[in-house]
Structures are given as structure tokens and as C-alpha cells.
């Protein structure tokens, strides 16, 4: 293999880049809404796939006793470029929601991996394999499985998939493509890392294990595709049996020489996470089949375990294998290899301990804060590999250069002491690193537990309650209900709730009036909440805005409690529960009303320095020969914006504004709208301008996800679009609405055109609050606005000129108030309401107001007879005084 040395490590540059992107995405995930699948695909589809393509080729040459030719190198380069480009396209396509891009990426990946597998098969058939040459069949089988997994993934990217198909896709790719590759590699790599002889039965065991492992993947994936839980379990149990055949020889090798180096410990830990995760899913499938909880329960469990397969298994086996292989392949002689190996072992036991203990903490039912801190410690431990790798490769290259040019001892690299890889250091030092890593995670966890005892499942119960009996209850959150919603608990019993969000779309949480709270759960996620010792009745609810009002509440009934004990929910003066009422454990605001500010907004004041009026202008559509396709991405974000002078609210916005951007077209135009949810809860979109079944395009998507909504405008009008996630009143009143203008075919040209969308605010705290649902219930808004800001066109009047024909499109977005649009000092000679002309360029009759109910719209036209300021209002005058007021400045 001398000819191949120095060539292969350079191929791992993309692996490093993918790892770096994974770490960056994981860090950004803590502050930005970002889909969890992105980090998993960056790691598995990017870094791990590239490493497999590189190193399985390397091992095939070694095990088949051949050498890479220049032709082999050129073709390998083409495959790697193709696979990395394809992986990037898949990720970009799913992020953007453009299915064609995803399909192109999947096709490129299938070609690259299929070519890779065919190359290995041809090399195997044309060579005289050694003792372990048959393990190349693992690589061929894994490549065949990935072609199936990639094709299924491309189909799933259309967005109309079911959870059981997603599980089938994951099983094929993780247990097939990655798992079979690792299984075939560790048979020879594990004893090599340990620097001992392989078990004499290792080759035979590997040959027997391959059909069992591959068959297990196929059976489990087929069972998932057919939503047959017991078939999934049978396939996974077969897979575990295959792993047992492999692991038996690995254990025998470890008995000869125990693992001490970073590479050995990292790979060993990865194998444990691998088998443990597969076992958990197998048990989960069996339990779900027996207790009747169905595939939804397995889907929730699988969603929790996949990150640990990625972080515990795939990431650790990757960095462990590279830590051994890179020094060996860089070569340069015994001394440089020892230098490189020793450098890769730097603080190795400490890094492995911190990573695995932190990952174990993440797997426990701890608070979201503790889970975040533990995951950050894991990331630091794993990211340190990149620094260690750079230093190790630099040290080894220096050693190679010094050794090659040294004519005497003085020219050789200087060392302060002997080169001692970590695996050969004294046991006391190795144990010290392990203890230090363990203490680092334990002390951080203990510190957090002292601040937040509930984070470890400790309640604030008196000391005497430590021995209280425990009652554990399974709860599901879905369809704006907790099931069960009423739980009877004997007084003096500690209540532990295991809650699973089985909703297909919505994010939920569960908080209690005694201050105990869970974190927000995406669809499929679950959590354990120790509510504490129950001594009196206790109320719980979902704190996502509006969910409590829609009935998502829970009542804990303390049976046998004395009447004097009363309720453990302690209402404050405003009638709302105290304790955790101000927010969730994740820092999100609760739905309890803040009561707003006691001071009414001063609408006569000047806006703040950052005030920018909403652009009310409607530009003329360019001429076209026929219908056109209009594409737009609407990104949902939580934005703190001023809505009246001195009043800010945290709005939920489309593209940062309320109302959202204006869509404008003609009858026959096709609209392709991509909705990206970068907010903190589930959102959706409903276009009144389109006529289609709402089931899929109008569904709620959780944070970090996207969907594409396509409709063709078949009728003219000014149509509303809005978020249809329940409670719809809250989402619309907090800024999630906008207008679509579809022009009639015979619409005459005018000199100026404006759009005014009337909306309402039910204010929470004036400094960044969110919509007050108690105020919505009164039907009495604090502000009524045109285009989202009270009286904004008093401060930035809309320009016009004497004699110009001005068209004003008006939409009443509601949620409650009708509109009577009127221009003071003006008369309308054209009125078009809800698709019909009431007046059309009339010379001797006119109209004074355009009356609209919520979700209705139209336009009026007028000319201004002389210079001056012409106020426009909603002639429900109380609403004009609430902010539905503006000016035309006529020159």
C-alpha cells in the first residue's frame, strides 16, 4: 500500500468541512429555528458518506492486496465530487422546498454510490482475497441499500409522506448504508487499533453475519413501509443477532488487549450506542404492538433515538477511525507515525468521557436547559477533534520532513521526552482523565440542579416527601387536548407525567400552576415531568398562545385531600394562575394575559426613530402575452415591531411585516408560494385567492420546516391570506395576514393605485408583548389600523395630484370589526366590491363609503378637485379614533 499513502488523507478534506458545517449548524440551532434533520443530514449524508466512499476504497485495496492506479484515483475523484455535490443539492432542495433540486441530488448520489459499489464488486471478483477479503461484500451490500434509501428519500421530499415511510428511509440509510459499512470495517480495524491479533473466528463470523444484518435491514424497513410493528421488531432483532456475531470476535480481541487509545475508546463507545439504540427501537416496536399505541408511538420513539444514533454511533465511529487511520496512511516511518498517533491521543480519554457522559445526560428526562448545556459539552468534546487533527497532521509532517533530511542526530526533531501515545501512558494518568471528564459533566449538572431542581426531576417538595409513593401517568398531547385531561392522584403521592406530543403538526408543552413546567415538544417528541407530591388539586395547561383557551388544559385531582387544603393553583389578582404563568421552561411566553398597559396609546405622538411606513403603493403589472408563474418565499418570523407611537408588540410575521407582502397578478396566473417557519411555534397559510382542498397546503408546519403552496388565480378580487393555525383569531390578530390582488381582465389604467388592509390589535404588554386573548374575547380592540400601524399615513401621507385618478384597494382582514372606508372631502365615482361594480366611472352619481365585513374587499376610485390634505378613515368613527386614519397629500 506504499503507493496509496499520502493520497487518501487529502480525500478527507470534505469530511472535515462537512463536520465543521454540522458543528456550526448545531451551534446555530441553539439560537435560530432550524430543522433537526439538517444537522443529521450534514453529518450522515455529508461527512459520513464521504468518509465511507474514501475509506472503503482504501480498505478494498488493502484487503484484496492491490494498489490504486492513476485511473483509480481519477475515477475516485469524480465519484467524490459527484457525491458531495449531490449531498449539497439534496440538502438545498429540502431546505428550499424545490423538489426538482432534491431529486437531482438524490439521482447524483445514486449514481456515485452505485458506481462505487460496482467498482468494489469488480475489484473483488478480479482479485485473490486474503483472509478478510470477503468483508468487501459488506461495502457492496451497503451501497446497494443506499440506492434504495436515496430513492425513497427523494420521494419523501415531495412533502406528502407518512411517518412510517420516513422510518423506513432512516433504517435503510443508517443501519444499511452506514451500519453495514461499519460492521464490515470493524472486523479488521478494531484489532488493528488495539494492536493485537484478530480473533481466529472473526472472518467466519463476519461471513455469517452479513446476510443476517442485510436481511434484518430489509425486513425492518419493509415492516416500517407497511406500518407493521412486529415485522419491524423482527427485522431489528435479526439485525441485533448479526451484530452479536460481529461483536463476539471484537470482545475476544479486546480481552487480549484492552482499549486505551482515543481511537479505540471512541469506536468502542460508538458500537455500544449503536447496539443500544437498535435494541431500544426493537423493544419500542414490540411494546407499541402489544399495548395498542400503534405506529405513532414508534415514530415518536424513533425520532428521539435517531439523534443518538447520529451523535453516539456515527459521529464517534467516524472520528475514532480517522484518529487511527490518518497517522497510519500519512506514514513516513515508525517515528512520524508514533508522533501523529500520540498527537491524536491528546486528552483522548477526557474527550471520550465528556462526549459520552454528556450524551447520556441528554438522553435522561432532564430540563431543556440541562439538555442544552450537556449537548454543548458534547459538541465541544467532539469539535476538539478538528483542532487535534490539524495539530497531529502538522506534527507528523514535520517529523517526516525532519527524518527524511536528517544526516545526523542533530537534524532530527527535538522532543522534550519520549513519544508516548495515550494508550501506553500510566494507568493513573488515564484514570485521571476519565475522572476529570466525568466530574466536568457531573459538576455542571449538579450546578444546574441546584438552580433548577426540577431539571433533574426533583420537585420542590418538603424533605419528608422523599419517600412518597410515585404514580406515573402516560399523557398524549394532540388536537388541542391532553389525554387524559383529568388525573386522580391520592393525596401525598408524587406524580410523574410522561407526555408525548402525538400531534401531526403543532408544538405543545405542559405547565402547572405550582411552577413545574416542561419544555416545548415538536411533533413526535416526548418528555418526563416530575410534578411533585400532590397535596391539593392542581391545574395544568399548554402555554402556547391560545392553546389553553381552546381547551388544552389538565386537572390534577388530589383524592382524599382535606377540604381546607384547597387548590394548589394560586390565582393572582388578575385571576390567572401564578407560578409558571409568565412563560415556559424554554423561555417562551405563556398564554396568560398580561393585562396590557394601563395607559392607552398616544396616537397623536410621533413614531419612534425606526418608523418606516408600510409601502401602500400598488405598481402596475407589466404587460404579458398570457398567464405567468409568480414565485415568492414567505418566511415566518417573530418580530418586535412598533404598532403605534411608543407601543411595540412581538408580532408573528410573513417576511417581517404585518400585513405580509402584497401578492399581485391577473386571472390565470400561477402562484408558487414557499412557506418557511422560522418562528417559535407552528404556523400555516391560507390563500383565499386559490380554490383547492386545504388538507395538505394549509397544514400547520412546526418551526424549522417548510412547505410549498401552489394555486392558480381563477377569479378576480382582492383576497385575504392568513395563518389558519388554531386559535386563528390569535394568529391573525398578531400580524399573520396579507392581501392578494387579482386584477379583472378589463381593469382600466389609473394614475395611482394604493392598497389599505384594515387590521386590529389586542395589545399585550406595550413593550414587546403578544396578542392578549382575553381582549380578543371582548371584541374590543385597542387599535384598528391600515397596513399594521395606527395613523401611520398621518405621519407619512400618501401622495396624489389634483385631477389624477386614484384607485384604492381596501381589504378588511378583521378579525372582528367591519370597515366603512371613506375619504373626507372626496367622492367615489367607481366602487367595486367583492367582484362586482356598484358604480363604474359614473358622471352624475357617487358613493361616500365602501362597506366591508371581515375578509371582504374591493376598490374605489376618485379624483381630487383641489390641493390639500384629504383624510381617509373607517367611518365607524370609534375605529378611526383607534388608528384607522390617514391622509392623502394632494398637490
Image: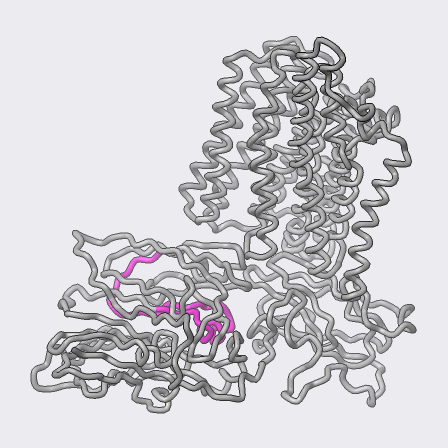
Q: Residue at x 68, y 71 (%)?
A: 511
Which residue does the image show at 84% across and 78% down from the upper left? 491
Q: Nearer the viewer, residue 415 or 439?
A: 415
Q: Is residue 881 left or right of residue 318?
A: left
Q: Position of residue 63 (x, y in %)?
A: 68, 15
Horizontally, is 116 left or right of 805 in the view?
A: right
- Could you tell me residue 632's position as x and y percent? 35, 56
Colour scheme employed for the rendering of this structure: one colour
The residue closer to the viewer here, 430 or 198, is 430
On the image, the x and y values in percent for residue 298 come to 67, 51
Asked whether residue 444 is in view, the answer is yes
- Between residue 796 and residue 227, name the one nearer to us: 796
Q: Quadrant of residue 553?
A: bottom right
* Residue 711 highlighted magenta (yes or no): yes
Point out the image quarter for the C terminus.
bottom left
Q: Which residues are magenta?
A: 710-738
Please tell me whether residue 827 is drawn above or below residue 434 in the rendered image. below
Q: Is residue 47 left or right of residue 375?
A: left
* On-image quarter of the N terminus: top right
Q: Looking at this rendering, what residue extends furthest in the left direction?
A: 843
Q: As displayed, is residue 808 above or below residue 524?
A: below
Residue 173 drawn in magenta: no
Residue drawn at (68%, 57%) of the image: 293
Q: Is residue 241 visible?
A: no
Q: Percent position (x, y) of residue 505?
A: 54, 61
Q: Is residue 297 above or below residue 433?
A: below
Q: Residue at x 65, y 25 (%)?
A: 138
Q: Quadrant of residue 832?
A: bottom left
Amino acid at each position: 500500500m506504499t503507493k496509496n499513502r499520502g493520497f487518501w488523507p487529502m480525500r478527507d478534506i470534505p469530511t472535515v468541512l462537512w463536520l465543521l458545517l454540522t458543528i456550526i449548524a448545531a451551534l446555530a440551532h441553539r439560537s435560530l429555528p432550524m430543522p433537526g434533520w439538517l444537522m443529521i443530514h450534514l453529518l450522515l449524508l455529508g461527512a459520513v458518506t464521504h468518509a465511507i466512499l474514501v475509506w472503503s476504497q482504501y480498505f478494498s485495496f488493502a484487503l484484496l492486496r492491490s494498489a490504486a492506479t492513476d485511473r483509480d484515483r481519477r475515477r475516485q475523484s469524480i465519484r467524490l465530487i459527484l457525491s458531495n455535490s449531490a449531498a449539497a443539492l439534496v440538502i438545498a432542495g429540502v431546505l428550499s422546498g424545490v423538489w426538482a433540486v432534491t431529486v437531482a441530488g438524490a439521482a447524483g448520489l445514486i449514481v456515485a454510490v452505485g458506481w462505487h459499489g460496482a467498482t468494489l464488486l469488480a475489484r473483488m471478483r478480479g482479485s485473490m482475497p486474503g483472509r478478510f477479503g470477503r468483508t468487501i461484500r459488506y461495502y457492496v451490500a451497503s451501497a446497494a441499500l443506499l440506492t434504495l434509501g436515496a430513492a425513497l428519500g427523494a420521494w419523501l421530499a415531495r412533502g406528502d409522506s407518512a411517518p412510517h415511510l420516513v422510518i423506513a428511509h432512516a433504517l435503510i440509510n443508517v443501519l444499511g448504508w452506514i451500519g453495514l459499512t461499519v460492521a464490515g470495517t470493524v472486523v479488521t480495524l478494531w484489532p488493528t487499533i488495539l494492536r493485537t491479533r484478530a480473533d481466529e473466528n472473526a472472518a467466519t463470523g463476519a461471513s455469517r453475519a452479513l446476510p443476517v444484518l442485510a436481511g434484518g435491514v430489509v425486513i425492518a424497513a419493509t415492516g416500517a413501509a407497511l406500518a407493521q410493528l412486529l415485522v419491524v421488531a423482527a427485522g431489528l432483532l435479526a439485525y441485533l443477532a448479526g451484530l452479536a456475531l460481529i461483536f463476539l470476535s471484537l470482545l475476544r480481541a479486546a480481552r487480549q488487549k484492552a482499549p486505551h487509545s482515543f481511537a479505540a475508546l471512541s469506536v468502542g463507545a460508538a458500537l455500544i450506542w449503536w447496539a443500544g439504540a437498535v435494541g431500544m427501537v426493537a423493544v419500542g416496536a414490540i411494546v407499541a404492538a402489544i399495548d395498542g399505541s400503534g405506529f405513532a408511538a414508534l415514530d415518536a420513539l424513533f425520532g428521539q433515538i435517531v439523534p443518538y444514533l447520529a451523535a453516539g454511533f456515527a459521529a464517534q465511529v467516524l472520528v475514532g477511525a480517522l484518529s487511527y487511520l490518518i497517522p497510519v496512511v500519512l506514514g513516513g516511518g515508525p517515528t512520524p507515525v508514533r508522533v501523529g498517533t500520540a498527537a491524536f491521543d491528546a486528552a483522548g480519554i477526557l474527550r471520550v468521557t465528556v462526549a459520552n457522559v454528556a450524551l447520556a445526560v441528554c438522553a435522561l428526562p432532564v430540563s431543556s436547559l440541562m439538555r442544552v448545556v450537556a449537548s454543548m459539552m458534547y459538541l465541544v468534546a467532539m469539535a476538539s477533534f478538528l483542532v487535534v487533527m490539524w495539530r497531529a497532521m502538522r506534527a507528523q509532517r514535520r517529523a517526516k520532513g525532519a527524518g527524511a533530511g536528517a544526516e545526523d542526530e542533530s537534524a532530527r526533531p527535538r522532543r522534550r521526552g519520549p513519544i508516548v501515545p495515550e494508550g501506553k501512558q500510566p494507568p493513573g494518568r488515564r484514570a485521571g482523565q476519565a475522572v476529570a471528564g466525568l466530574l466536568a459533566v457531573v459538576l455542571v449538572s449538579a450546578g444546574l440542579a441546584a438552580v433548577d431542581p426540577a431539571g433533574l426531576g426533583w420537585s420542590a417538595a418538603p424533605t419528608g416527601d422523599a419517600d412518597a409513593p410515585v404514580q406515573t401517568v402516560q399523557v398524549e398531547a394532540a388536537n388541542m387536548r391532553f389525554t387524559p385531561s383529568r388525573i386522580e392522584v391520592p393525596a401525598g403521592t408524587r406524580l410523574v407525567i410522561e407526555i408525548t406530543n402525538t400531534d401531526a403538526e403543532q408544538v405543545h408543552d405542559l405547565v402547572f400552576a405550582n411552577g413545574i413546567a416542561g419544555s416545548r415538544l415538536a411533533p413526535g417528541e416526548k418528555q418526563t415531568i416530575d410534578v411533585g407530591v400532590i397535596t391539593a388539586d392542581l391545574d395544568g395547561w399548554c402555554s402556547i398562545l391560545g392553546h389553553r383557551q381552546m381547551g388544552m388544559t389538565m386537572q390534577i385531582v388530589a383524592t382524599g385531600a382535606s377540604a381546607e387544603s384547597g387548590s394548589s393553583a394560586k390565582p393572582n389578582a388578575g385571576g390567572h394562575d401564578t407560578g409558571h404563568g409568565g412563560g415556559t421552561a424554554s423561555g417562551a411566553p405563556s398564554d396568560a394575559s398580561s393585562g396590557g398597559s394601563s395607559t392607552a396609546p398616544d396616537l397623536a405622538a410621533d413614531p419612534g426613530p425606526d418608523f418606516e411606513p408600510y409601502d401602500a403603493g400598488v405598481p402596475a403589472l407589466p404587460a404579458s402575452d398570457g398567464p405567468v408563474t409568480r414565485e415568492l418565499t414567505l418566511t415566518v418570523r417573530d418580530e418586535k415591531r412598533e404598532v403605534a407611537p411608543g407601543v411595540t408588540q412581538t408580532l408573528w410575521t410573513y417576511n417581517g411585516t404585518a400585513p405580509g407582502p402584497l401578492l399581485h397578478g391577473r386571472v390565470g396566473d400561477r402562484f408558487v408560494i414557499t412557506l418557511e417557519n422560522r418562528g417559535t411555534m407552528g404556523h400555516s397559510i391560507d390563500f383565499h385567492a386559490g380554490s383547492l382542498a386545504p388538507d395538505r397546503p394549509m397544514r400547520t408546519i412546526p418551526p424549522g420546516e417548510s412547505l410549498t403552496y401552489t394555486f392558480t388565480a381563477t377569479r378576480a378580487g382582492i383576497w385575504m391570506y392568513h395563518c389558519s393555525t388554531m386559535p386563528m383569531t390569535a394568529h391573525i390578530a398578531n400580524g399573520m395576514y396579507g392581501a392578494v390582488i387579482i386584477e379583472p381582465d378589463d381593469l382600466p389604467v389609473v394614475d395611482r393605485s394604493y392598497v389599505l388592509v384594515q387590521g386590529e390589535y389586542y395589545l399585550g404588554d406595550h413593550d414587546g408583548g403578544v396578542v392578549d386573548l382575553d381582549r380578543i374575547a371582548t371584541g374590543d380592540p385597542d387599535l384598528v389600523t391600515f397596513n399594521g400601524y395606527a395613523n401611520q399615513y398621518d405621519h407619512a401621507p400618501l401622495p396624489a395630484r389634483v385631477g389624477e385618478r386614484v384607485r384604492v384597494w381596501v381589504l378588511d382582514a378583521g378579525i372582528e370589526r367591519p370597515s366603512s372606508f371613506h375619504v373626507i372631502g372626496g367622492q367615489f365615482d367607481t366602487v367595486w366590491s367583492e367582484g362586482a361594480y356598484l358604480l363604474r366611472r359614473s358622471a352624475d352619481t357617487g358613493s361616500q363609503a365602501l362597506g366591508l365585513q371581515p375578509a371582504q374587499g374591493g376598490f374605489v376610485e376618485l379624483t381630487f378637485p383641489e390641493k390639500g390634505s384629504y383624510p381617509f378613515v373607517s367611518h365607524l368613527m370609534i375605529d378611526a379614533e383607534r388608528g384607522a386614519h390617514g391622509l392623502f397629500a394632494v398637490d
